[in-house]
Image (spheres, rainbow, N blue to C red):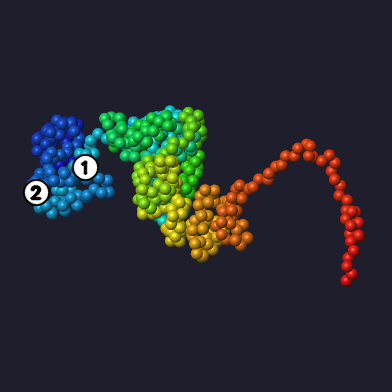
Amino acid sequence: MLIVETIAKVRRKYFVDGVSIKRISLDLRLSRNTVRKIVRSGKTEHQYHRINQPVPQLGKYLERLHQMLKEDSAEPKKSRRTAMKLFETLRAEGYSGAYDSVQRCVRKWEEEERSNPPQVFIPLSFSPGDAYQFDWSYEIVTLGGAVQTVKVAQIRLCHSRMFFVAAYPRETLEMVIDAHNRAFAWFGGTCRRGIYDNMPTAVDDILKGKDRNFNRRFARMCSHYLVEPVACTPAAGWEKGQVEKQVQDIRHWLFAPRPSFENFDELNRWLAERCREICSTRMHPEDKEKTILEVFEKEKSSLMAVKSAFDGYTETGCRASSTSLVRYDKNQYSVDCRSARKAVTIRATADRIRVFGKNGLIADHKRMFGKHKTIYDPWHYVDALERKPGALRNGAPFKDWELPPAVQQIQARLLGQKGGDREFVEILSAASAYGLPPIEQACIKALAQGTVQSSVILNLIVRELDPPKAETVTVSDRLRLKEEPVADCSRYDLIRREVQHAAV
């Protein structure tokens, strides 16, 4: 290959000094054709590029190598195989050539891939109150001393960049609805459009273009808030790029180092406070003289008002078991024993489990997460105790039952005597009818009197709730005295003196 200095000498001798091609060839020991090529081409540098690299050993393995490279291109960069790993795979399949051939082929394939036209993103602009973006992220926190992965719902107003995040144990539809309820209450309004990815909790079917079949409950939520849901094109995350970047930022701002709280309620209160703090200090990316919070205060007037939160539950039908339990999300919850073996409807929200029967609400529990837990409400089984009072001693729903201290003392004394369990069931039945506070007051009075009997306690309850009324007597005017009598004790003194006492 001719170096740049040799080409420069040839050009100066020919064009400046006027030396002939034959003389230059002799002086510089170059062939006449080489000198003639330099003079006629006008180039200051000549390079040789091989069009086709011969690969006699790798030839029949090229297709296999390209197939592996194509498979790896769909994986994250850290998961792709190196050229050495590909070489070892080919060697195992019979390739006997050198590693350099494989390395050159891999480098050429990567260069060709990079030479494809790069993807161009178009900057987006949103007017106040126009749209918000929603997405989920997975973060690691410490709750109650245990390290666990939580799902974080992230909502961002596209104009002001004001954001809100809330953590949940699940990424289910009721959590999606609860996150919207919290966010819209926190923002003080909502936008006209909501931009989402094609999350299965909201989208049932992806149709042509932007058309989607949204989940019925999700569509009802959007209708309640007058929001038009817009789904992104599959694999086009740039269409909601603001919240995609927020996911990365929030991970550094709020979850590094790992936060530690007792429960989700404490965690979510802290997240809401930190969202406002960050937005009050960070400058807006476009209006760089104002903070995000200042731009948001102006955007609030453009948000649509929220009159009420959407009742965000998911509904499931089932049949209560013979032990008055229903199963939901791998846990069991008690219901009124009168609904045992009957069809019921479970309405699950982000934090409550409500069960409805034919005549209305029959159970209301705090929602539990995890697996294989049974949540009892002892009052659901009081009616069954009237027929089976003996179950009061060893029944699973009645273990660790937190009753008022006075009621617990009555229970301990009654269960220590024959037939006492039936008497205490009578007291519990009265509590389910009249409420626990009157029962507690009656038990306190019974203990003070030292009469621990169900009949006495029930009598005290009735007298407290329905005291006897004094009868009013009406007197006729003809019978009413005109002059009030005056007491005169002198007559009794006279009689006393006239009485003769026997001598002792």
Earlier-in-chain disc, 2 versus 1? 2
Q: Answer with the quarter of the image where residue 479 lies.
A: top right
> What is the three-letter code of the residue carrying label 1?
Glu
Q: Which residue is mark 2?
A: 57
Residue at image position (53%, 55%) is: 427
Q: Which residue is mark 1?
A: 110
In this rendered view, identify the residue nearer to me: 144 or 421.
Answer: 421
Would you call the spot at circle 1 few (<14 residues within 10 Å), some (14-19), or many (20 or more)? few
Vertical order, 463 against 214 (above or below): below
Q: Answer with the quarter of the image where residue 410 lies.
A: bottom right
Q: Residue 166: x, y in percent?
A: 43, 43
Specify the quadrant that holds the N terminus.
Answer: top left
Vertical order, 329 against 232 (above or below): below
> What is the three-letter code of the residue carrying label 2?
Gln
Residue 28 in view of the camera:
no
Tell me whether circle 2 and circle 1 mark residues in contact (CB < 8 Å): no
Residue at image position (71%, 42%) is: 473
Q: Residue 370: x, y in percent?
A: 38, 52
